[in-house]
Image (cartoon, rainbow, N blue to C red):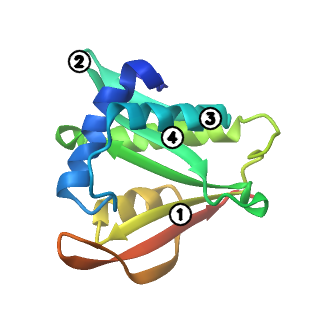
């Protein structure tokens, strides 16, 4: 089931999902675990902007999330959003990420006119190498827009960051 994230009810579980990547993966450049309070604030901020943050869940709770947020905080960027998706490590490879993105993109297309709509461009930022992340974005029509070499350092190594973009119209 997919639904809007609830900052209070979902924050602890979504922080746990995300913190796996903080501690064990380069998918995020955060290096310190995110608290449930921080996650709740992030969800609330996205919702306050009128943008979607959605979760997929089963009978045990949230199994993944996807969201859109401003790409940058300058007015000229208002119609470009950064998108991301994270899944519980045990739930990868089952199509849940694609399902989340389908619903996220449907909701973005349906946004009423406003500060971020109509959405013109979507950007995904991918720490390299992450072949599954590249594959999901390319399957939705994103194209490689550039790479910043050695953009971050995590786990005692330099990591490149690729930008994938989809221009909507």
Question: Rounded to the nearest whole Å, what is the CA distance between mark 4 and mark 3?
Answer: 9 Å
Q: Which residue is mark 4?
A: 102
Q: Is residue 12 positioned above or below 28 on the image?
A: above
Q: Nearer the viewer, mark 4 or mark 3?
A: 3
Q: Which mark is residue 107?
A: 3
Label 4: few (<14), some (14–19) or many (≥20) C-alpha neighbours in 10 Å: some
* Residue at the image point whose x is 42% and y is 30% from the top: 55
Which residue ends up furthest to the bottom in the rendered image? 149
Q: Is residue 128 left or right of residue 53?
A: left
Q: Residue at x 51, y 40 (%)?
A: 102
Task: Say if mark 3 contacts mark 2, CB within 8 Å.
Answer: no
Where residue 142 is drawn, which disc sits there? 1
- How far from the left and from the top, in percent, is residue 136? 40, 56
Q: Earlier in the sequence, mark 4 or mark 1?
A: 4
Circle nearer the viewer, 3 or 2: 2
Quarter of the figure that contains the C terminus:
bottom right
x, y (%) of residue 39? 40, 36
How far from the left and from the top, in percent, is residue 41? 49, 34
Residue found farthest to the right: 113
Front: mark 2 or 4:
2
Q: Secondary structure at mark 4?
A: helix
Q: Is residue 18 above or below residue 143?
A: above
| Tag 2 residue | 60
- How far apart in space, not on screen, are marks 1 and 2 (Cα)? 32 Å
């Amino acid at each position: 089931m997919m639904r809007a994230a609830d900052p209070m009810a979902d924050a602890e579980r979504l922080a746990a999902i995300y913190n796996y990547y903080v501690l064990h993966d380069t998918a995020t450049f955060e290096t310190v675990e995110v608290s449930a309070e921080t996650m709740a604030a992030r969800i609330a901020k996205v919702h306050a902007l009128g943008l979607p943050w959605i979760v997929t869940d089963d009978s045990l709770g949230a199994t993944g999330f996807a969201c859109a947020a401003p790409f940058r905080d300058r007015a000229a960027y208002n119609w470009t959003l950064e998108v991301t998706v994270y899944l519980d490590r045990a739930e990868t490879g089952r199509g849940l990420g694609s399902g989340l993105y389908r619903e996220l993109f449907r909701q973005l297309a349906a946004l009423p006119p406003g500060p971020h709509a109509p959405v013109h461009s979507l950007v995904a930022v991918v720490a390299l190498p992450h072949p599954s992340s590249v594959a999901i974005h390319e399957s939705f029509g994103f194209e490689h827009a550039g790479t910043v070499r050695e953009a971050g350092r995590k786990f005692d190594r330099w990591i490149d960051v690729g930008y994938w973009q989809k221009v909507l119209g």
